[in-house]
Amino acid sequence: MSETLLLSQHLKFLRGHLITLPANYRSFDSNRAAILYFTLSTLDVLGKLEEEVDAELREKLIEWIYRLQLKSDSGKCFIRNINTSD
């Protein structure tokens, strides 16, 4: 087995998870925030985060995460249930 990291294939896989989940992952829709977290973390570990996520996409992702937040009167913040219409 090769010990070489297939960087271009990893990046292609990760790019496919930034905006929309691939069809075979639709059952994981409620976990999109976690999938986004691990996708961005992996890009960062590979040293490709800035290259793969431009300023426009970064703003869209931040806005999406903020839309998921529910703030309570106590000042605590929660993540609401995610569905495919988000």
Image (cartoon, grey):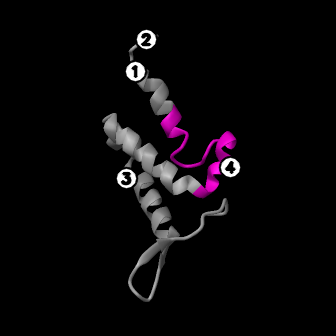
Tell me which residue sits at (63%, 54%) in the image. Answer: 29
Side of 27 where 63 appears, left or right: left
Position of residue 23 measured from the top left corner of the image (x, y, whole percent): 69, 42
Crowd band around label 1 with a 10 angstrom C-alpha radius: few (<14), some (14–19), many (20+):
few
Alpha-carbon distance for marks 3 and 4? Answer: 29 Å
Front tag of 1 and 2: 2
Alpha-carbon distance for marks 1 and 2? Answer: 8 Å
Q: Is tag 3's residue or tag 4's residue first in the polypeptide sequence? A: 4
Query: Relative to 56, is 45 above or below?
Result: above
Asked if marks 3 and 4 touch (Cβ < 8 Å), the reply is no
Image quadrant in which the C terminus is located = bottom right
Q: Is tag 1's residue or tag 4's residue first in the polypeptide sequence? A: 1
Position of residue 59 measured from the top left corner of the image (x, y, whole percent): 41, 59
Residue bearing mark 2:
2
Crowd band around label 4 with a 10 angstrom C-alpha radius: few (<14), some (14–19), many (20+):
few
Front tag of 3 and 4: 4
Front tag of 1 and 3: 1
Alpha-carbon distance for marks 3 and 2? Answer: 35 Å
What secondary structure do most residues of the magenta stretch adopt?
A: helix
Position of residue 84 measured from the top left corner of the image (x, y, whole percent): 67, 59
Q: Label for residue 58? A: none
Query: Relative to 62, is 47 above or below?
Result: above
- Residue range corresponding to the magenta coloring: 13-30
Query: Relative to 62, is 5 above or below?
Result: above
Side of 1 where 31 appears, left or right: right
Residue bearing mark 1:
5
What's the residue type where badge 4 is placed?
Ser
Q: Is tag 3's residue or tag 2's residue first in the polypeptide sequence? A: 2
Q: Label for residue 27? A: 4
What's the residue type where badge 1 is placed?
Leu
Alpha-carbon distance for marks 4 and 2? Answer: 32 Å
Front tag of 3 and 2: 2
